[in-house]
Amino acid sequence: MPSISNKGRQMPASPIRKLVPFAEAAKKRGVHVIHLNIGQPDIKTPKVALDAVRNHNIEVLEYSMTQGSEAYRKKIADYYAKQDISVSSEEIIVTTGGSEALSFAMGTIMDNDDEIIIPEPFYANYNGFATASGVKVKPIVSSIDDNFALPPISKFEELITPRTKAILICNPGNPTGYLYSKAEIEQLAELVKKHNLFLIADEVYREFAYDGREHYSILQLEGLEENAIVVDSVSKRYSMCGARIGCLISKNTEVIQTAMKFAQARLSPPTFAQIASEAALETPQEYFDNVITEYVARRDTLISELKKIDGVKVAVPQGAFYCVVELPIADADDFAQWLLENYELDGSTVMVAPAAGFYASPGLGKNQIRIAYVLEKEQLVKAVQILRSALKKYKD
Ligand SMILES: Cc1ncc(COP(=O)(O)O)c(C=O)c1O
């Protein structure tokens, strides 16, 4: 048989999706599975976005411009202006999800065996994008004990080698829920300038900042124009994960020109989804206010329920809609599978994401899970009840 590539062998399976066959088997047995494992919000997509697609009478569904339609990019620039971020439409490339923006970013600035420093735990697919690009992830551990705040800058400096090309942060963080402060962003900016590195910020959860905190973008920093690359997406902002639209932004013209060559190879981002995404920019502020109120209520319910379980440690999220939970067990992979294969309470069980896949350092996160609070409060309460009784039985 012809052999597949080493790269293919090394590609990590998604820790979020790898338990799917066990969940499907549980459903076939008639068990109701509460999904806490995946960041698919149950929030309705804004009507303006869906209507724009419904009411369009396209006769030829043609390719769009490689960098995305001009009208859409201009409106994206207007959206950033409202966030106190000054970018022009030429500094934006529309991509097929934030995912494609991440792979364009890596392809644009990194060669085989170059290194990227990422605070862990991090969005698990960063491992996948790095492997696909031949890039080495150098993780720097952040701790549940201080809510996953930015590790000391000295720890970053220890990891910098001649092969280091970039630092990647996710702000607010998936899976940590941590929102970097302006001071933390400024420290990172100093560091990348000092060592001539890129700073990539995945800001797909920008709107999801809680308790009066404000998101601070790396694009708001003066003097970082050559170093900063932002990855963005409509997936979570407008609950439009299936649209597959995101963008890559940089004021560094060489970065944009190079990323454009990757973009040309895949021709263009999806046309209908751009129409929906352009219309989504008209979403009234009230929509976001309601969504944030809903997520804060869900977070508060989830955290207070989790804190009732003996031996459980949880980082309180300040943004996004995930939290990392430390459980009084040794192997969360085994526990998550066991929940789906062997446990039910009144006909229901829960599916969680084992957190080890969100770390690059072997052995870390083995007793942690990630919970996405993308379900209604009643479901969250029920899910935590199941977790609590399951933990008792599992440990016996
Ligand atoms: C942190 C982060 N970045 C990027 C993505 C990719 O999003 P999409 O490709 O749907 O825009 C996700 C999706 O969950 C995410 O959580």
Image (cartoon, helix red, strand yellow):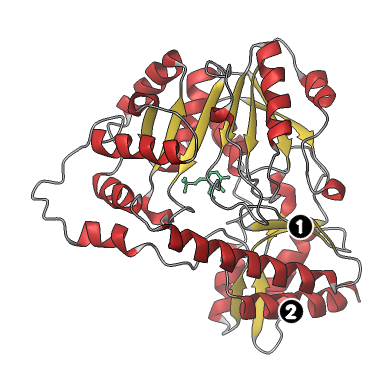
| Foreground pick, 347 / 51 | 51
Q: Residues within 10 Å of mark 2 (few under 14, many from 20)?
A: many
Residue name at image x 24 percent, y 44 percent: 271
How far apart are labels 2 and 1 at the CA level? 21 Å
x and y percentages locating residue 345 in the rendered image: 71, 85
> 384 above or below 232?
below
Question: Residue 126 got which mark?
Answer: none
382 relative to 30 in the view: left or right = right
> 269 above or below 301?
above
Q: Residues within 10 Å of mark 1 (few under 14, many from 20)?
A: many
Residue name at image x 42 percent, y 67 percent: 44
x and y percentages locating residue 383 in the rendered image: 69, 76
Residue name at image x 61 percent, y 68 percent: 22
Which residue is under mark 2? 386
**Three-letter code, disc 2:** Ile
| Foreground pick, 289 / 136 | 289
Marks 2 and 1, the one that precedes in the sequence: 1
What is the residue that sits farthest to the left in this orientation?
59
Q: Is mark 1 within 8 Å of ligand 1?
A: no
**For residue 82, what is the image quadrant?**
top left
Residue 99 seen anywhere in this rendered image of the structure = yes
Disc 1 is placed on an element classified as loop
x and y percentages locating residue 185 in the rendered image: 68, 31
Which residue is under mark 1? 316
Residue 6 seen anywhere in this rendered image of the structure = no
Q: Is mark 2 within 8 Å of ligand 1?
A: no
**Three-letter code, disc 1:** Val
Residue name at image x 58 percent, y 42 percent: 125
What is the residue that sits farthest to the bottom in this orientation?
346
Disc 2 is placed on an element classified as helix
